[in-house]
Image (cartoon, rainbow, N blue to C red):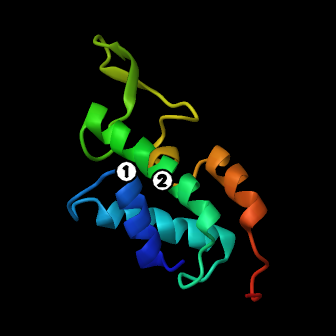
Amino acid sequence: MTASEMLEAVKKNLKIEDDSRDLVISDVILAVCDYCNLSQMCIPDILEPVIRKKIKGILDYEAANGTGYQPEIASIKEGDGTITWAQTEGNTKATIYGLSDSDKAALRRHRRLRGYV
């Protein structure tokens, strides 16, 4: 399956009718290809659920919090003007929009050695 076929499959399975999310989907597909050392012309069909779930997580996050990244606040101290951000494994920008450790664990069995097709 090519990257464009994967994009269409993910859009079909998530019931996305317009092209507004194509860039986000393409970014996730490219990140998966880079991590797994795969060509964009030959992506295994079995990776579609992993990509779809990652896109669904991004869409759910943006639906709840708006587009972009907005960190959660753990505490605010007004006297000195201190703000403490709640940074956990699940809510950092890298894990929401990039590949998290659990995503990498799911992709690990599909990785190829660099230089081999």
Tell me the residue at 20%/61% (across/down).
18
Mark earlier in primary sequence (1, 2): 1
- Image position of 41 (left or right of 108): left
- Residue 74 found in image quarter: top left
Position of residue 40 measured from the top left corner of the image (x, y, whole percent): 53, 81
Q: Residues within 10 Å of mark 1 (few under 14, many from 20)?
A: few
Label tally: 2
Residue at the spot x=79%, y=78% of the render? 113
Q: Amino acid at mark 2?
A: Arg
Please give the label number shown on residue 52: 2
Dot 1: element? loop
Quadrant of the rendered structure where residue 42 is? bottom right
- Residue 58 horizontal/vertical position (percent): 39, 46
Which circle marks residue 5 in the picture?
none
Asked which secondary structure carries label 2, the reply is helix
Task: Give the number of the disc on residue 14.
Answer: 1
**Residue 26 appears anywhere in the view:** no
Q: Nearer the viewer, residue 97 or 88?
A: 97
Query: Is residue 17 visible in the rendered structure shown here?
Result: yes
Residue sitting at x 32%, y 37%? 70
- Residue 37 vertical placement versus 88 (above, below): below
Q: Position of residue 24 (x, y in %)?
A: 35, 61
Q: Are marks 1 and 2 in contact (CB under 8 Å)?
A: yes
Residue ID at (25%, 45%): 67
Q: Nearest to the eye among marks 1 and 2: give it.
A: 1
The amino acid marked with disc number 1 is Leu
Q: CA distance from mark 1 to mark 2?
A: 7 Å
